[in-house]
Amino acid sequence: MTSTLPQAQAVPHVASPLEDYLALCKEACDGEINRLYGPRQHGSSGGLYDLILDYPLRGGKALRPALGIAICLGLGGHLEAILPTAATLELYHNAFLIHDDIEDESWWRRGKPTLHIDHGIPIAVNVGDAMLSLSLQPLLDNVERVGLGPALRILRAIATMTRRTVEGQAIELEWVRSNAWRLDDADYLEMVELKTSWYSFITPLQAGAVAAGADPDQLAQLESLGRHLGAAFQITDDLLNLRADPEDYGKEIGGDLWEGKRTLMLLHALRSAQPRDRERAVAIIGRRRPSATGELGLTDLLDRLVTRGDLSSAGRVELAARLNGAHAEPKSLNDIRWLYELMHQVGSLDHARRIAAHHARGAAEVLSGMGWLPSSQHRDALVGLVDYVHGRTR
């Protein structure tokens, strides 16, 4: 395929290096996603394959493809060797977002209603499933692009990535379900490594290196780089969720508090708060978020069932008792504001910024020690990405 992205052998000067580099990577990735997964390739339109392109083409920085492309081209590889894998990783990312939005009951994604709000949960689940299923073929086709050995190593890396990502998501969902709060920074960072670092940073970097024919010994440094980047990025993303401009951030502001997610700031606040405040905070985060379509009116529904004779009075009492916990009073805006103020009062936001900055510096140190990656526009892009993550922590 053709692309305007520069190869390792020809690097033109650009005015804004990182932004221009990311834009070129996104352009190449969007084109490859459309080539691999678009409606024209599958003889259909207006259905599944149009929806597959919905999230990927809403915007975003294409960070994961850019990491894979930068390390591959920086090591002298060719764009065609990594681009299908980079596009596949972006498809994985967006499939995870679709499922994540359903699990979190999120309403907005990149400035638009989430897929399940627009099209319903069954269709959204199927689109996410399709994206994960269709991603297998390009990885198998890597045999023809990079050879059997590298193709299998990339496939193994992505298999590891998917397992660890769903394990991390399971940990986070269980914390919310059980209203766990006796957790420390190490618990959070372990969850983030599984949920975020592997699929957003470690695997894109390692896949790009493998596609370029890198020495297996170099993959360990890339794992360390990706682990630090993932921690700094996720902590900062959690911080931005509390205060960013919705158009810049692309998600609902304060959504993590509405969802009861155990962020570094929330856990620090719970550990640091006075007992009475801690008790109130634990009670708030244990409540459900309001429904996007309004409350269900379960009392009226049960009364109608009894009136029609479809439910006995005794059955109504038992069913109401069972449903009471699941449909108790939801969180309110005042609850969210109070939690935010509590985190401010006990220094939780500053604590999170310090931890994020520590990992951003760690990433910069690892990258500076990668003497086997020669100076080029592609290495400069990686340095710029580390600086970007570090800048978001300030």
Image (cartoon, rainbow, N blue to C red):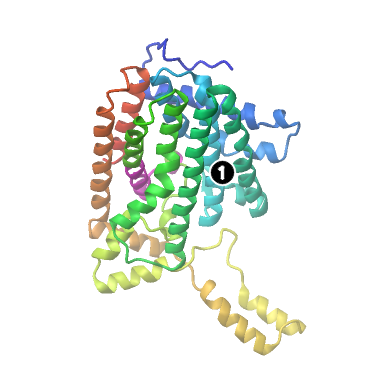
**Residue 58 occupies which quadrant of the picture?**
top right
In the rendered view, would you say 234 is above or below 183?
Answer: above
Q: SS of the residue at dot 1?
A: helix
**Residue 241 within the magenta-colored segment of the rendering:** yes
In the rendered view, would you say 112 is above or below 31?
Answer: below
Where residue 309 appears, x then y in whole percent?
76, 84
Q: Is residue 241 visible?
A: no
**Residue 210 within the magenta-colored segment of the rendering:** no
Q: Amino acid at mark 1?
A: Ala
Closest to the observer, 374 or 97: 374
Q: Give the class, few, some or many, for how many residues have Cα within 10 Å of label 1's Cα (few <14, many ≥20).
A: many
Q: Which residues are magenta?
A: 230-247
- Left/right placement of residue 74 relative to residue 149 reads left
**Helix, strand or loop for the magenta stretch, by majority:** helix
**Residue 322 occupies which quadrant of the picture?**
bottom right
| In the image, farthest residue toward the front | 149
Residue indicated by mark 1: 95
